[in-house]
Image (cartoon, helix red, strand yellow):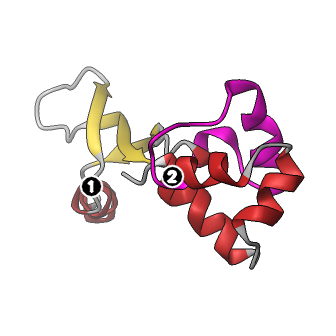
């Protein structure tokens, strides 16, 4: 996970700005910028929204925060048809897991039918 100092320095360099120029923009000393980039100190928390806005990013991205994102899909299945099983298996092969499965009551000799709820958890 990237740190604030690494992210801040990369953003500054992407805009081709010197530490002195960035210091003037944010109203701090060039030494403060140097300390931020060397991870010996950090900006006051009240500066973070302005820094994120200036670099067209978010405070979360600036701080290297990764969010867990859950995606869910609900699929109707009839396992008497092979394509239903193939579709579910394709999602499972792609890292999805079965969160819930609901089937209709079956009479003897019937194939399962119902709904499967798939879930995929990712870092964003």
Instruction: State the SS at label 1.
Output: loop
Along the line of sight, the residue nearer the viewer: 44 or 93: 44
Q: Is residue 69 left or right of residue 81?
A: right
Q: Position of residue 64 (x, y in %)?
A: 49, 46
Disc nearer the start of the sequence (1/2): 2
Q: Which mark is residue 5?
A: 2
Q: Position of residue 28 (x, y in %)?
A: 78, 43
Q: Is residue 57 magenta?
A: yes
Circle 1 sits on which residue?
95
Farthest residue to the top: give it: 105
Q: Residues within 10 Å of mark 2 (few under 14, many from 20)?
A: many
Along the line of sight, the residue nearer the viewer: 119 or 113: 119
Q: Is residue 67 left or right of residue 119?
A: right
For the record, the magenta segment spans 37-61
Along the line of sight, the residue nearer the viewer: 78 or 47: 47
Q: Residue at x 54, y 42 (%)?
A: 63
Q: Position of residue 13 (x, y in %)?
A: 65, 74
Q: Residue at x 61, y 47 (%)?
A: 62
Q: Residue at x 32, y 57 (%)?
A: 91
**Can I make out residue 30 in this image?**
yes
């Amino acid at each position: 996970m990237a740190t604030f100092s690494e992210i801040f320095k990369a953003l500054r360099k992407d805009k081709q700005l010197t530490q002195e120029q960035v210091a003037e923009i944010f109203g701090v000393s060039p030494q403060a910028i140097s300390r931020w980039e060397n991870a010996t100190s950090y900006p006051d928390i009240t500066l973070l929204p302005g820094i994120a806005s200036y670099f067209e990013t978010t405070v979360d991205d600036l701080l290297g925060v990764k969010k867990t994102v859950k995606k869910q899909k609900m699929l109707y299945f009839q396992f008497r048809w092979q394509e239903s099983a193939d579709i579910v298996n394709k999602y499972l092969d792609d890292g999805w897991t079965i969160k819930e499965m609901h089937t209709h009551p079956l009479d003897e000799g019937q194939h399962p039918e119902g709904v499967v709820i798939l879930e995929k958890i990712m870092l964003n």
